Amino acid sequence: MPSGNMPEQLWVAVGDIHDDASLFARIPELEKAAGVLVTGDLTIVGGVKRAEAVVEVLRRSGKPVLAQIGNMDKPEVDHWLTEQGINLHASTRELAPGIAVFGAGASTRTPFGTPSEFPESAYEDWLKACWREAGKYPHAVLVSHNPPRDTACDVIPGNAHVGSAAVRAFLEEAQPDVCLCGHIHEARAVDKVGRTTVVNPGPLAEGGYALLRRDAAGLTAELRTLAR
């Protein structure tokens, strides 16, 4: 458990950037953040060149960046992120002592035939594999482009829930501290699956971002929106 005199640690989470990172530098907490987490959709059906342009904007902050593809990014972006040493998708990393971060990028099947879509079974496998390592840590954060199904973070107009059943089932069983997600732009929200806090900050281009905090009380996450 964190000690009572542990200094606060802070990370900024953004997603659904879609080629437009122009608002990123305006995030007020960025200066004191320990790093940046990207939930997915760096581009709009873009490849390495466009993803690289977005990551370069994020790196100008001087903060470490960990990122993964969303469904709108071409598969080649996944390989490029791995080459850069910053890929979260289907991998587990130590975010800070005692905190694991692991990712599940791309998305489950959509009606739109976007570049990076996979069946629910792939998410079951990726999450299970990541949890073998992440589950050893006192605290864990899942960065999932897909929101978990049947939450406030996966609702589209008409009150239909379109999130991932596999992500939902995983959260119910594993109960990591936090799940940072995206994908569903109109479902900017905070919800709970058991003890797991689920946060969908909405698109960065609309000013949405999230803060992940670690302090003496533990690990928490919250929504933020830039003033326009």
Image: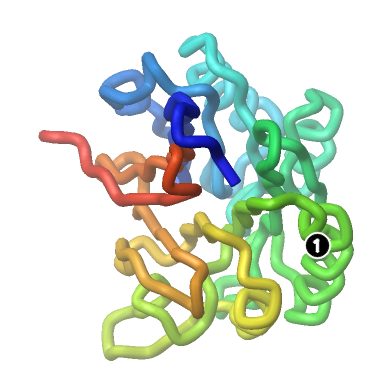
| 128 and 56: which is toward the camera | 128
Q: Residue at x 60, y 46 (%)?
A: 1
The residue that mark 1 highlights is 131
Q: Residue at x 54, y 25 (%)?
A: 35
In the rendered image, residue 25, in percent from the top left (x then y), is placed at 34, 19
In the rendered image, residue 87, in percent from the top left (x then y), is placed at 75, 38
Q: Does 109 appear above or below 226? A: below
Query: Which amino acid type corresponds to the residue marked 1 in the rendered image?
Result: Trp
Q: Residue at x 42, y 47 (%)?
A: 217
Q: How is the image coloured?
A: rainbow
Q: Residues within 10 Å of mark 1 (few under 14, many from 20)?
A: many
Q: Does 59 appear above or below 98? A: above
Q: Quadrant of residue 94?
A: top right
Quadrant that contains the C terminus: top left
Q: Does 129 appear above or below 9? A: below
SS at badge 1? helix
Q: Is residue 20 visible?
A: yes
